Image: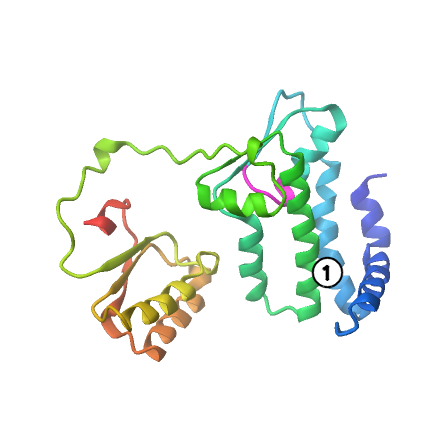
Amino acid sequence: VTLAQILEDRGSFRPLLAAWAEHRAANPDLPPLTVAQAARAAQSADRTLGVLDARWPQVDLVNASANGTAALAAMARQWADGTPFVLTEHGVYLRERYLALDAAGWDWTVRYVSMAFTRALCHLAYREATYIAPVNRFNSRWECRLGADPARIVPTPNGVDPESFPAVPGEPDEPVVSFVGRIDPLKDLRTMIEALAIVRAEIPNARLRLFGPTPAANTGYRASLEALVADLHLGEAVTFQGPSPSARPAIE
């Protein structure tokens, strides 16, 4: 019998309800958790826990390219036979889950429970990883605050061919901030646009250029950004430049 089968038969919503009742007793301002809400949160957690059943070939090292579910699979192998586990993070998984759940439309209580589970999982992975290799030092600050040992963090920036990025002479005629990446809620572009409105109160000619494609599933998000630009009266200060073959056009 696998863990996934046990969770499918019984689910974890009953112990979740019991844990919430205990948590609420210590925090009486919290709302009650209904059975439906517990079942929704448990469904997400149970799917994640199911990766503990994964069967592995013989390997010398496990690399998880993100925290969360991938890291849990790596930890399962480490716990089973001591295989070292390296966590390489391009983004900050916990931060991205906060952003994703904010837009998911779930009840507040379900989001609270789901993020408590996710945060605990991320804490555990940072504690258990043999080494942690974030793509930059910004990520490492999150990792340290979530319990990672700084001695096991080795920031490893993306490799860049300097011949593809010769120095740009001089400065632009106007102060410009460029973003390069897909138009996606995980990039939190709303905050960037709101920040520009604050900046323009001091630097009226500041501009923001957004380079990158808009996936079909994110057209609604793109429309919400355009509405935000209009609401903040930013006009042509924010421009959507579309897909770019590289980051080079953003800095020219």
Q: Which residues are magenta?
A: 65-71
Residue 75 lies in the magenta stretch: no
Relative to residue 126, is residue 173 depicted above or below?
below
Residue at (74% x, 57% y) in the render: 43
Numbered disc total: 1
The residue wearing badge 1 is 41
Which of the pair 187/125 is nearer the observer?
A: 125
Q: Residue 11: horizontal and vertical position, in percent? A: 82, 54
Relative to residue 143, is residue 25 depicted above or below?
below
Residue 70 lies in the magenta stretch: yes
How many C-alpha atoms fall within 10 Å of the one at disc 1: few (<14), some, or many (≥20)?
A: many
Q: Is residue 226 left or right of residue 146?
A: left
Q: Residue 9: horizontal and vertical position, in percent? A: 85, 52
Which of the pair 150/12 is nearer the observer?
A: 150
Residue at (40% x, 36% y) in the render: 157
Q: Residue 40: horizontal and vertical position, in percent? A: 73, 63
Quadrant of the image containing the N terminus: top right
Residue 111 lies in quadrant: bottom right
Q: Is residue 203 left or right of residue 228?
A: left
Q: Is residue 172 left or right of residue 197?
A: left
Amino acid carrying label 1: it is: Ala
Q: Residue 177: horizontal and vertical position, in percent? A: 28, 57
Q: Is residue 196 at least partly visible in the picture? A: yes
Residue 38 lies in quadrant: bottom right
Residue at (69% x, 56% y) in the render: 116
**Secondary structure at numbered mark 1:** helix
Residue 211 lies in quadrant: bottom left
Residue at (68% x, 42% y) in the render: 124
**Colour approach in the figure:** rainbow
Which of the pair 113/173 is nearer the observer?
A: 173
Q: Is residue 55 at least partly visible in the picture? A: no
Q: Is residue 153 left or right of residue 68?
A: left
